[in-house]
Image (cartoon, helix red, strand yellow):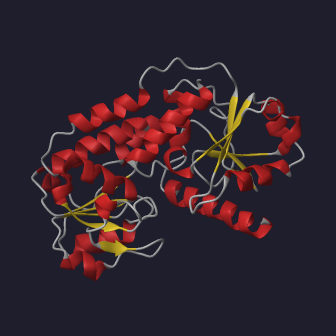
Amino acid sequence: MLRRWTLSTFAILLSIILTACNTTNTQQPQAQATQSITTTNTPSQELAKLSAKRVVTLSSLTTDIIFQLDKTKLVGIAGSSLFKNDPRFQDIPRISEGQSPPNLEKIVALKPDLVIGAEGFSNQPIQRLQQLGIPTLLTQVNTWKSLEEITAKLAQLIDVNPQPLLERYQSFLGDRPGTNTPILVLVSSQPILAPNKNSWAGDLLEKFQVKNLAAELQGKSPIAGYVTLSAEKVLEANPEAVVLITPPQGGSKTEVLASFNKESFWQKLPATKNNRVYVFDYYGLVNPGSIDAIKQACEQIKKDLLG
């Protein structure tokens, strides 16, 4: 079990690094996110004239957004565990599986008039496709605002109305009474990582007015939007509630809890003593993943942290 959890922790760290590798670690994350979501290899003036009818997506979130906006425009997608057993996507060709790079020959054979990738994941294939004359767009979603903006941008590119989907996003938030309960989110145990306000998780918690104890912390972590904490720092934070994260490739809540239970500080925390430890899925809270994953994370925040 120890070896399995070590691999799970590594998978979380790798996924966060890939997600955040092109996110600038600045004091102004909102402004940076707004600038980065429209990074393209195809000139903006050319995209402005586009009314795409055949779209290939290289990330799970953009796959879901395009499908929700107009599923008839989606002709190829990257394989994702989020959609593996989802009947909605069964008949759509896969151009990659798992962490393997997208198959450029398959993409070209689909004759797309737009290919959408994600910063940090898709830069090289997007550049190659642009060289072949295929319109491309790189996206980055690390705040709620950037989620709304990229949705509006994609709707413009396929010539549909984004408003119904944007209103659906707002329904996920609902009434947000907030909480004064000091909360700490721990995404891994070796090392101990917590999201600050410069991450998707931190921004989502801020949307719900959750008191994230790591929000203002800064550190030398190589992962933008995350800080590395020592056991002493966790004890000093003294959280009344703790959120733990299951690994992206799957894992039980029992394994997640067991990994932290071995830490010397764990039984000393008010959250542990008062049984206020909650386990969230990686997709939705750490990585937006899909629209349903975001919805589920929002529902769990309201149920566990605001309830």
Quadrant of the snapshot with the N terminus: bottom right
Displayed quadrant of residue 71: bottom left
Q: Residue furthest bottom?
A: 105
Q: Position of residue 254 (x, y in %)?
A: 73, 52
Displayed quadrant of residue 131: bottom left
Number of disc labels: 0
Query: 112 and 69: which one is in front?
Result: 69
Q: Position of residue 145 (x, y in %)?
A: 38, 35
Q: Is residue 172 left or right of residue 77?
A: right
Q: Position of residue 269 (x, y in %)?
A: 83, 34
Quadrant of the snapshot with the C terminus: top right
Can residue 27 be seen at all in this image of the molecule? no
Q: Residue at x 13, y 58 (%)?
A: 52
Q: Is residue 15 left or right of residue 36?
A: right
Q: Residue at x 41, y 58 (%)?
A: 119
Q: Residue at x 32, y 57 (%)?
A: 63
Q: Position of residue 280 (x, y in %)?
A: 60, 44
Q: Residue at x 80, y 29 (%)?
A: 274
Query: 220 and 265: which one is in front?
Result: 265
Displayed quadrant of residue 59: bottom left
Query: 272 and 207: which one is in front?
Result: 272
Can residue 16 be seen at all in this image of the molecule? yes
- Establish if 44 lies above or below 111: above
